[in-house]
C-alpha cells in the first residue's frame, strides 16, 4: 500500500456565505472522538498523536464564498502504521471560532 492510498481530502465549508475574508483553523482533536462516540453509540479509538499530518492548518474562505479554495489533505504517517491496531476514528474540527458557521469534516479510518 502506498502513502497516496493512506490519505483523504476534505473541503472546508460554511453554512452561509462569508461577509468578509475569513481565516479558518483546522486541527485534529482526539477529544471529539469521545463526543462522537457518546452521540452515536460507537466505540472508536482516537488516532495516536502524530499519526496524521494535515496539508494545511489555516485556510481562508473568501468574502461571498461558502468554501475555502483549497481542500485539506489528511495523511497517515507511515511510521505510525504499526501502532494502528484498533478501529480508529479521525475527526477534523474546521473552526472553534465559529462552530455554528463552519461544518467539520470527519472520516472513519
Image: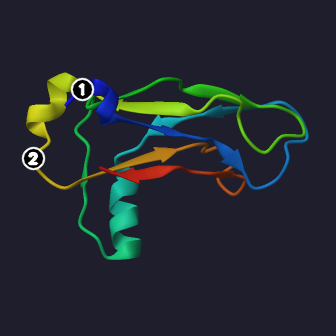
Q: Which residue is mark 2?
A: 85
Element carrying mark 1: loop
- Answer above or below: position of 29 versus 34: above
Q: Give the side of residue 36 with respect to residue 60, left or right.
A: left
Residue at x 27%, y 28% (from the top left corner):
50
Q: Is residue 12 above or below residue 58?
A: below
Vertical placement of residue 90 versus 33, above or below: above
Q: Quadrant of residue 69?
A: top right
Residue count near mark 2 (Cα–Cα under 10 Å), binned few <14, some 14–19, many ≥20? few
Quadrant location of residue 15? bottom right
| Residue sitting nearer the eye, 82 or 19 | 82
- Relative image position of residue 41 (x, y in whole percent): 32, 76
Give the quadrant of the N terminus.
Answer: top left
- Callout 2: SS: loop
Residue 62 at what x, y percent from top left? 82, 31
The circle drawn on residue 2 is 1
Q: How many marks?
A: 2
- Crowd class of label 1 (few under 14; some 14 to 19; many from 20; radius 10 Å): few
In the image, is residue 57 above or below residue 12? Answer: above
Q: Is residue 68 left or right of residue 48?
A: right
Which x, y percent locates residue 87?
19, 55
Q: Residue at x 16, y 23 (%)?
A: 79
Name which quarter of the figure residue 5 lies in.
top left
How far is mark 2 from mark 1, CA to CA? Answer: 18 Å
Q: Looking at the picture, tell me which residue is in the foreground, 6 or 61.
A: 6
Observer-side mark, 2 or 1, equals 1
Q: Residue at x 39, y 64 (%)?
A: 36
Give percent across and percent down for residue 64.
90, 40
User: Horizontally, is 12 left or right of 10 in the view?
Assistant: right
Q: Residue at x 47, y 44 (%)?
A: 92
Amino acid at each position: 500500500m502506498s502513502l497516496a492510498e493512506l490519505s483523504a481530502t476534505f473541503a472546508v465549508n460554511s453554512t452561509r456565505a462569508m461577509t468578509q475574508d475569513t481565516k479558518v483553523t483546522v486541527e485534529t482533536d482526539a477529544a471529539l472522538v469521545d463526543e462522537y462516540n457518546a452521540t452515536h453509540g460507537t466505540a472508536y479509538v482516537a488516532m495516536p498523536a502524530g499519526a496524521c499530518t494535515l496539508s494545511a492548518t489555516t485556510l481562508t474562505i473568501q468574502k461571498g464564498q461558502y468554501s475555502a479554495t483549497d481542500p485539506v489533505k489528511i495523511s497517515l504517517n507511515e511510521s505510525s502504521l504499526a501502532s494502528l491496531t484498533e478501529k480508529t476514528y479521525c475527526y477534523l474540527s474546521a473552526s472553534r471560532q465559529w462552530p455554528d458557521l463552519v461544518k467539520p469534516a470527519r472520516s472513519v479510518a
